[in-house]
Each structure stands twice: as structure tokens, then as C-alpha cells.
Amino acid sequence: MPSQAAGAGYNSARVLNPSLPVTQPRILVTGGSGFLGRQVLDALSRRGYEHVEAPTHADYDLTDADQVAACVRDARPQIVIHMAAVVGGIGANQARPGEFFYQNLVMGAELMEQARRAGVAKFVAIGTICAYPKFTPVPFREEDLWAGYPEETNAPYGLAKKMLLVQAQAYRMQYGFDAIFLLPTNLYGPGDNFDPQSSHVIPALIRKCLEAVETGDSAISVWGTGQPTREFLYVRDCAEGIVAAMERYARPEPVNLGSGEEIRIADLARLIAEVCDFRGDIRFDPSQPDGQPRRKLDTSRALAAFDWQSTTSFREGLQATVDWYRTLRTTANPRYTRLAP
Ligand SMILES: NC(=O)c1ccc[n+]([C@@H]2O[C@H](COP(=O)([O-])OP(=O)(O)OC[C@H]3O[C@@H](n4cnc5c(N)ncnc54)[C@H](OP(=O)(O)O)[C@@H]3O)[C@@H](O)[C@H]2O)c1
């Protein structure tokens, strides 16, 4: 079978989870080569899971129904964690809304259907904060998910992923299928995508600041007015939350995964400049879109339902991200976009 045994190589550092059943479950992880996926594989390994399969995009194209069926047939999972997705910042969402909608919708729908047919015991679907309405009352509570249309620049992506929630609830109702749906806020951390064509705001700003320091540029440009707010979750904390939910959550209601901390983009840019030692001007470009006006999640359900909350402070997480990317730039081609942390 063309998939890789993803837990291999982690066993020496593993801490066995005393609550693991004697017979370990077979877990299929999609998107395991991605930014979040790699961290989820590490988190599973730390928890002592050994039978983890993480086939890559090259192994199975999950937008192809036959390949989805083959993937599930070959892996024979009892648990599926679905993270494969087409993902990007505002620019990528605006440039490729059709791909973001179709590929994310089809991957999720086909995979959950094949998992149900194969008798999978648990399906963990990863959604996104982009599923929330544009003007959700802050902090965003899961009950408000259907109170309006998402912000236009990321609506095709957000709605495609939101259909996983509808499918999960429908399958639970009709088939008793245990599918859960989690909504992570914007993630950041080592291993993020630093490609200027598709990156999210934190890696984009880190890259601009470090390049300006290297070239001696006296100013950087930041998309939008700087006025919107965002919430960011350290990717390793998110991975821990996903594994905690996989182990302890089995209800139809969606659950937010966030840090609960809100920061204005202008303040974020100043903080990143400080961490990157960039002392030049920060110029906002209001001709570029702002995206959603405010983002901050209510994270109380995750704490109550499966005892998870984020633990990494924003400053600490940013420093780790900048350190990782700095090392990458000095040890690899600076044009490089991704590498395992
Ligand atoms: N990053 C964030 O801030 C954020 C926030 C909230 C939720 N999420 C969710 O978290 C999940 C992971 O995001 P990420 O940031 O880790 O994205 P990522 O780094 O781009 O990883 C996406 C993964 O999906 C795989 N993939 C894409 N298309 C595929 C296909 N047709 N068939 C099989 N595999 C495919 C990619 O493989 P290739 O690279 O080989 O194509 C990659 O391994 C996604 O579901 C996303 O919606 C992310």
C-alpha cells in the first residue's frame, strides 16, 4: 500500500497514554504532511498511538471519489482525522475561490461517506473560523454559526468546510455515525507556509520584516487598514486539542479551538516587527482587503467538553515561529516556502 506509517520514528520520545485500549485503534490522518497535520501526527505519537497511517496527496488525491474509497479500503481505519484541504490567506482565497470551494467540499463529503460505509467508529472533521458569519457577536459562540453569511473573501472556503458539520450531524442522526466537528481559529507556528502567494498574515509579516532587515529596507507594507482583529492559536496547542477531542468528545455540537485572545492587525504588525528586530516604518495599504472585521472565539465549550485549552502565550509562540523561520533562511534557500519543523 502506498501510504506511510506516520508514527514511525517517534517512539523513543513517546509518553504512553494510560487510557489507551489494549488493542490500539487504527487511525487514518489526511493532510498529515501539512502544517497542522505534522503537529497532529506528533501529538498522536506523544499520546502513544502507534497505528497511524498518513498517506500523502501523491498517494491518494482525495478529490477523486475512487481514490478516496481506495484510501479508506487500504488504511482500514477505526478513526479518521480529516485535515486535508486547500488552504491560504485572503489573497489565495480571492484568486482561487472555485478551487477552495469545490476541492474542500468534495474531499470532506467523499471521505466521510466512505468512512461511514467502511464502519469507521470515529470521524474528526476539521473546520475553520472562516465558517462564522461576517458580523458574528464577539466572542464567537458555536450557537451563532448560522446567524449570517461569512465574510465574502473567504466564504467559499468557509462554507465548503461548514458542510462537514451538516454532514456530521446528518450522519449521526440517520446512521448513528460518530462524527465531530472542530473549528480552529487562525493558526501559526513553526512549519507554517511562508510562500508570499498563499501565506496567512503571521508568516507573511514575519517574512516581510526579516527580508527588510536583510536588505536594509526602511518600510514594510501591510495589507488593509490594520484595524481588523484576529485571534491566533499556536499550531501545537491546536493539535493537542484535536487529539483530546478525538479521545473525549462524541457529540453533534461543533466546538471552537482558540486561544481566546484578540489582537488588532496593526498591533500584530508592531509586535512581529519587534520580535524580528525590524525598526522601520509599517505602512498600511487600505487598497487591499481587510477580511473579516473581528475574530475572537469563545473557547469555553472545549474546556468543558474535553478539558482542553491553549497553553502557549502569543509572544512565546511568535518567538518560536520567528526563530524557526530565521534558522530556515540561514540554512536553506531563502526562497524556500515549507519544511518540516
Ligand atoms: N492554517 C490555519 O490557520 C487553519 C486554521 C483553521 C483551520 N485550518 C484547517 O486545518 C487543516 C490543515 O490546514 P493546514 O494549514 O495544515 O494546511 P496545509 O499545510 O496546506 O496542509 C493541507 C494538507 O492537505 C493536503 N491536500 C490538499 N489537497 C489534497 C488532495 N486533493 N488530496 C490529498 N491531500 C490533499 C496537502 O497535501 P499537499 O501539500 O501535498 O497538496 C497538505 O498535506 C485544514 O483542514 C484547514 O482548513 C487551518
Image (cartoon, rainbow, N blue to C red):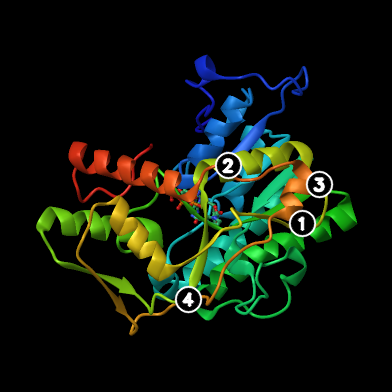
Depth check, mark 1 against mark 2: the one in front is 2
Mark sitting on residue 311 = 2
Relative height, residue 137 to residue 192 (above, below): below
Kind of residue at disc 4: Gly
* Circle 2 crowding by C-alpha within 10 Å: few under 14, some 14–19, many from 20: few
Can you identify the residue that label 4 sits on? 291
Q: Secondary structure at mark 2?
A: loop
**Residues at marks 2 and 4, CA–CA distance in whole angstroms:** 27 Å
The answer to whether residue 113 of the structure is visible from this angle is no
Residue 153 horizontal/vertical position (percent): 49, 77
Estimate the spatial distance between the alpha carbons at disc 3 and disc 1, rounded to whole Å. Answer: 8 Å
Q: Is residue 13 left or right of residue 75?
A: left
Which amino acid type is shown beneath numbered disc 1?
Ala
Residue 41 higher or lower than 249, as above or below: above
Gap in angstroms between the C-alphas marked 1 and 2: 29 Å
The alpha-carbon separation of the residues under discs 4 and 1 comes to 28 Å
Q: Which amino acid type is marked by label 2? A: Thr
Disc number lying in front (3 or 4)? 4
The residue that label 1 is drawn on is: 168
Residue 163 lies, in percent from the top left, at 69, 65
Number of the front mark, 2 or 3 = 2
SS label for mark 1: helix
Point out the tag, 3 or 4, that comes first from the N-terminus: 3
At label 3, counting other C-alpha atoms closer than 10 Å, the crowd grade (few under 14, some 14-19, many 20 or more) is many
Question: Where's residue 28, x and y in %?
Answer: 62, 37
- Determine which residue is flagged by label 3: 178
At x 76% / y 42%, what residue is drawn?
A: 306
Give the numbered dot on residue 279: none
